[in-house]
Amino acid sequence: MKTLFDLIVLLFCLAGYVCDLSISPTRPVSVDALVGSDVTLSVSHSGASQPVVTWFMEGVPIVIWTISDNTSPDVASDHSSVLHVDRNGSLTFRNVSLSCNGTYTVEVTKIGEMRVSATFDLFVYDFIKNVSLHTDPLEAIEGAPVLTFYYSTMQGDAREVWWSFNGIGLDNGPHYSINGKNLTINQPSRNDTGQYAVVLTNPFSSGTHYRNITVLYGPDMPVLMVSPTKAVFVSGDSLFLSCAAEGLPPPSATWIFSNRSIPASSGGTVNLTEVTTSQSGVYTCVLINQKTEIPSGEPLCSVQATNESPGLQFLCVWPGGVPEARLSFPGLRVNDSGERIFSITPNDTTSLNGEEIICKADHPLIQTQCSIIPRGPVDFLPVIFTNISQDEQTTVVVHCNTEASPEAVVHWFKDGHGLKDGSKYQISTNTSQLFIRDFNVNSTDLDIYTCTAINPLGSKTSNVTLLGPQISDSSIVLSDNRTEVTLKWNVPPTSIITGFDIQMKGPDLTVSSRSEFRTIQMMPGFTRTTNISGLEPKSSYFFRIIPQAGGNTGERSDEHRVQPDAGLESAVIAGITAPFSIILILIVLAFIYNGKCDRNPRRPISRAEEKVICQSAVNDPHRCPPPDYRLQPPERLTALPYVNTHVRRATTV
Ligand SMILES: *[C@@H]1O[C@H](CO)[C@@H](O)[C@H](O)[C@H]1NC(C)=O
Ligand SMILES: *[C@@H]1O[C@H](CO)[C@@H](O)[C@H](O)[C@H]1NC(C)=O
Ligand SMILES: *[C@@H]1O[C@H](CO)[C@@H](O)[C@H](O)[C@H]1NC(C)=O
Ligand SMILES: *[C@@H]1O[C@H](CO)[C@@H](O)[C@H](O)[C@H]1NC(C)=O
Ligand SMILES: *[C@@H]1O[C@H](CO)[C@@H](O)[C@H](O)[C@H]1NC(C)=O
Ligand SMILES: *[C@@H]1O[C@H](CO)[C@@H](O)[C@H](O)[C@H]1NC(C)=O
Ligand SMILES: *[C@@H]1O[C@H](CO)[C@@H](O)[C@H](O)[C@H]1NC(C)=O
Ligand SMILES: *[C@@H]1O[C@H](CO)[C@@H](O)[C@H](O)[C@H]1NC(C)=O
Ligand SMILES: *[C@@H]1O[C@H](CO)[C@@H](O)[C@H](O)[C@H]1NC(C)=O
Ligand SMILES: *[C@@H]1O[C@H](CO)[C@@H](O)[C@H](O)[C@H]1NC(C)=O
Ligand SMILES: *[C@@H]1O[C@H](CO)[C@@H](O)[C@H](O)[C@H]1NC(C)=O
Ligand SMILES: *[C@@H]1O[C@H](CO)[C@@H](O)[C@H](O)[C@H]1NC(C)=O
């Protein structure tokens, strides 16, 4: 009856009646294939006479075919030699390669009506060849945080991986974790010594690799023996000391008495025959194995502030070595020690200000130490710098640097208000510098600023009253030959100054204006002295200094007068020096002319000015380069490798 029905349906379909489109398989199918073989992803469909069949690899179309006698499949060009499609829709790979591994979907479409699809997972495998097993670290050591095995193959991937230890299969758990190609042993111990194996299988092959692992350990706590067992020995007694401990590689013992080693047998025993009172004391046995190695460099001590009270953390860092050095801070009266990076946060820090804190670093082959002195901030004076940027903006930098350990954090205030890092105020990363941008001496920028430097051991506050441009004192010295003067001046330390105008009144070789001060030099804000040469010894000159801050002029200095000397002696001097001064002027003229910096060549000119003017052709000499506001972040401690203990010491009396 059923056959008859099917036949009827089929006849209807052949006659072009509407039928439901169907495909098989209807569920995803896994197909395993060996590299180089031919494999077919087999489908069949019904319900359409000339459907469109499309194959996708990972969603990308690779074959399209409207099945009929007079069309041929459209195959992606890079697959054309490999892929073949049957009329029933099946896709065949010839000489399949590893790159064909993936998910394939076929869609069958009845034009304009329906679409059905089927999915295949194609797993392409190669024969597994040459499995090998490695460990990280190379040497298995008891006490290391982990020991990782990982396998590799020269060819072929595994579908299943089986790990075993002494023939017993391993599973994920607290001691073992299996992840990808790795087997990780947490906290390996001597009990993990044995034979490990990894068995890799795929549908076409398998591979196994064995590895015997010896976990090194020890030396364990030594067992000390004194024979005979007596509390006290008297002169003339003989006794026997022994020292031994488990370990792999086996440790060897050395005995030390009053800082000298004493001969011992290879088994670690010492015979003391007919002892005398001078042999009373502490006998120390040191057990070392061949792996023993001093850490490199020196231990480093430091102290840092912590967020929690009481806020000081002492650090002692000396990584490396076998075994690692034992680090401790005996001065902090804390019965604790550590390795590599050892830190301690003492309860009471007040008594530590200014005390040298020592970290003892004990290694079987060397005892050494480092130290650090924690200190609260010490008194300091703020220092002011003034910079002009390229766009004529004045930035004032206040430095509040104080010595402190750990480094102090500086808080900034103006008029009792805390200053925050922003556009007007910038605070350096280490907080010790305040940058006041766009400083205007006419505004409230000129004010009292307060900086408070704090570390867990104390704080210090300093006020700085910024002053407008001003000269605190000035002086003039005339050279013996009376053709040159040296002007010197000082400014208050907190005065904001970006430059000085040096002005002169006196005979001028070109202009006959003797009655007005004229600017003859413009000096940058850091200068405190200048020379003016080429003066006429017989003439009278006045000099003064005008401090500047950005576009603002401060109060001028006193006027300094250089008087003509009417005396006979000075006339003689003048007579002798006159030709020299003319020569000097000529030289200067020639220089300026060549430099094309000629502004006012016939007046007296200083050497400092020559430089200033000639540089101005390139760059404005009064502008200092903008300061580098970027500061390096503090260095971090990097993670350090782990190494295990191989030495133990013990002491007997
Ligand atoms: C599809 O056709 C090919 C050859 O034409 C045949 O080998 C294969 O078995 C067919 N597949 C199905 C599912 O009918
Ligand atoms: C199979 O393909 C590989 C490259 O993928 C080629 O080296 C090899 O010659 C091919 N084998 C045959 C029989 O075509
Ligand atoms: C092979 O394809 C399968 C199915 O898409 C996928 O699960 C597997 O990760 C692929 N293997 C490789 C090695 O790409
Ligand atoms: C791989 O193993 C075979 C035998 O098992 C050996 O002859 C060959 O040298 C090995 N190749 C490598 C690269 O180790
Ligand atoms: C496997 O071990 C290696 C070496 O220890 C490590 O670099 C890698 O991250 C580990 N991979 C996984 C998946 O755990
Ligand atoms: C090793 O095994 C022994 C015996 O089972 C056990 O007593 C010892 O604690 C183990 N050692 C370690 C380091 O796990
Ligand atoms: C590894 O250990 C096993 C069992 O402990 C032993 O039979 C085998 O000879 C060892 N292999 C090597 C290479 O030492
Ligand atoms: C120490 O004395 C014991 C017996 O008294 C003897 O067996 C041993 O060889 C001696 N050892 C040494 C290092 O002299
Ligand atoms: C700090 O004080 C607490 C209790 O007063 C004590 O238990 C702890 O051991 C102290 N720690 C140190 C590092 O002195
Ligand atoms: C600053 O104030 C002085 C006098 O009060 C004035 O002469 C000068 O032009 C002002 N400068 C600026 C840049 O406002
Ligand atoms: C700083 O100035 C404020 C008032 O502006 C004053 O109260 C404080 O005592 C001064 N501090 C120092 C250290 O001079
Ligand atoms: C005058 O003396 C100054 C130094 O005192 C010297 O540099 C200069 O060359 C002298 N001038 C003449 C013209 O001798």
Image (cartoon, grey):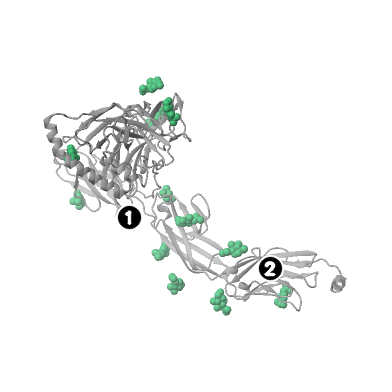
* Quadrant holding the C terminus: top left
Mark 1 vs 2, N-terminal side: 2
Question: Looking at numbered disc 2 in the image, what kind of residue is underneath it?
Answer: Trp
- Using the rendered image of the protein, determine whether residue 176 is visible from the camera's viewpoint: yes
User: For this view, does 158 lie left or right of residue 301?
Assistant: right
Instruction: In this rendered view, identify the residue nearer to me: 506 or 323.
Output: 506
Image location (x, y in percent) of residue 596: 32, 48
CB of mark 1 near ligand 7 (< 8 Å): no
Q: Is residue 46 above or below residue 328?
A: below
Question: Looking at numbered disc 1 in the image, what kind of residue is underneath it?
Answer: Pro
Q: Quadrant of residue 472?
A: top left
Q: CA distance from mark 1 to mark 2?
A: 63 Å
- Using the rendered image of the protein, determine whether residue 433 is visible from the camera's viewpoint: no
User: For this view, does 253 lie left or right of residue 430?
Assistant: left
SS state under label 1: loop
User: For this view, does 104 lie left or right of residue 591?
Assistant: right
Q: Quadrant of ligand 2?
A: bottom right
Residue identifier under label 2: 55
Image location (x, y in percent) of residue 593: 29, 48
Q: Is residue 159 above or below residue 437?
A: below
Residue identifier under label 1: 249
Of tags 1 and 2, the one toward the viewer is: 2
Instruction: In this rendered view, identify the residue nearer to me: 584 or 190.
Output: 584
Q: Is residue 27 above or below residue 501?
A: below
